Image (cartoon, rainbow, N blue to C red):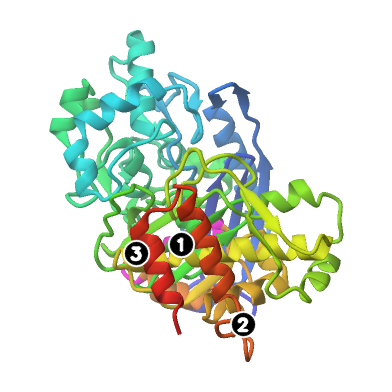
Amino acid sequence: MSTRGAAGTRGNEVWLGLDVGTQSVRALAVTAGGEVVGAGSQPLTSHRSGARHEQDPEAWWEAVSAASSEAMQTVSAATVRGVAVDATSGTILLIDRHGSPLTPALMYDDTRAAGYVDRVNAAGERAWAELGYGRMQASWALPKLLWLLESSPQLTRGARLAHQSDFVNRRLVGRDVPADLSNALKSGAHLIEERWPGDVMDALGVPADLLPALVRSGTVIGEVSRAAAAATAIPPGTPVIAGMTDGCAAQLGAGVLSPGRWNSVLGTTLVVKGVTHELIRDPLGAVYSHRAPNGDWLPGGASSTGAGLISRDFAGRDLDELGAAASAHEPAEALAYPLASTGERFPFVAPEAQGFSFGGDGSEADRFAAVLQGVGYIERLCYDYLDLLGAPIGDVVLTGGAAKSEYWCQLRADILGRPVSLVENSEPALGMAVLAASPGRDAAGVAAEMVRVRATIDPRAGSAGRFDAPYVRLVDELEGRGWLGAALATHARQRAQP
């Protein structure tokens, strides 16, 4: 059904999602039924040197303007009902009272503030424990804020902290805007009390007037100004809705907003995100939770396993052909823990962990099968850990580049022992269109209308228990090397028993 024509009926309303990523800005205009009626993109450039990773904030606005204008070319301005922005988690800068950048943007993986982490964790020990993640890391925003304040004290008078999404939202609205709790998590926002922890900030020397007000994601924070409308082609007066981090936006784009539902994002690495009514507290700090628009929690963790090893070790190969050959090796004789780099973050924390593979029949097909299955075993271990922490495990939606492999998706369903769903489009920008359509409504219900399920894959007949023995072998090996704790190892073995 066409979405064009006169405004006033739900069928032709459109919401705009903006995804400000690392390499590009992506804009999608989406109808209530999930049809993408406008799209645009614009590249971004990073500047990296050792631990430093910076971008020019003005380039974000230029890219947002170009991508939005492109998306609006096929959209009637009269149908646009809202816009929301997501951005990379932990990316910050300082701005002046006019919203102009005082510093470059320190990106999500910039670790130059590593020397401030112990001070941040000492000051916020109680608060970080209450919030379930226990410790901040060098790439988080609060250590980077201290670095900015102490390295450029001449800039701090009248300055304000801005997350990447805050900077874009301020340009859209034309005045100061509050920060959403999702992006403010890594800056130290107390997500339970929905405020800045004043005692922690005072102990760290962070001025109260430096910090923006806080609101939940999904809150209307203003309207598109006439100046912004001229730059972006988004109609003036369009409501601007507080967004989320890019990871949470992708979760919304997958339609995962109901408690017990989970999203496995498998690309270079594996990210697992879900929904719970209660806050999950992880003594290891491998799992941390964002706040959902309705007050539920969005726990998740990122593993260092994933398809990155395939890109490295099987570069240039026909992966469909390799997958077909691997299907004759279920389970593989080889056992693999597929890490592309040193260190594991989830479902256990082991900075010294290294990938390994042993055994096998010497064939490439068996080796490839072991890698595919090894990723599936770690994914299963992630869900076993979430179960151990008390999270309900229900439906699983698969997204990411690996979701394009029909065989690997089937294999993962078999290893997990549960059906998995695939969606037509899980872009973060789609998730922001869902969020833009949510004020005054249940976001889960909006997602059910806007996110289109492409397929559901059930475990194959006879697959029950087929992969239990090699899964337990990997659990034993990880525990034996001192990386995996006894509690999770025991829990995983118990859940693998018939």
Where is the N terminus found, in terms of image quarters?
Answer: bottom right
Q: Is most of the magenta stretch helix, strand or loop? A: helix
Which residue shows up at 30% across the image and 39% down it? 135
Circle on res. 382 = 1
Q: Is residue 453 left or right of residue 328?
A: left
Which residue shows up at 76% across the image and 61% down it? 368
- Within-10-Å neighbours for mark 2: few <14, some 14–19, many 20+: some
Kindly indicate whether the residue at mark 1 contacts the one at mark 3 (C-beta within 8 angstroms).
Answer: no
First reached walking from the N terminus: tag 2 or tag 1: 1
Rounded to the nearest angstrom, the CA distance separating label 2 from label 1 is 20 Å
- Within-10-Å neighbours for mark 1: few <14, some 14–19, many 20+: many
Amino acid carrying mark 2 in the image: Ile
Q: Is residue 310 above or below residue 106?
A: below
Can you give x and y, in whole percent of width and height, for residue 113 in the image?
41, 23
Q: Which residue is mark 3?
A: 439
Circle on res. 202 = none
Q: Which residue is mark 2?
A: 457
Is residue 431 at all visible to an observer of this figure? no
- Within-10-Å neighbours for mark 3: few <14, some 14–19, many 20+: some
- Tell me the quarter of the picture where residue 89 sits: top left
Q: Is residue 77 above or below residue 242?
A: below
**Magenta span contains residue 436:** yes
Q: Secondary structure at mark 3?
A: loop
Amino acid carrying mark 1 in the image: Cys
Magenta part of the chain: 428-442
Q: Secondary structure at mark 2?
A: strand
Q: Is residue 407 left or right of residue 447?
A: right
Query: In front of the other: label 3 or label 2?
Result: 2
Q: Is residue 56 left or right of residue 491?
A: right
Where is the C terminus found, in terms of image quarters?
Answer: bottom left
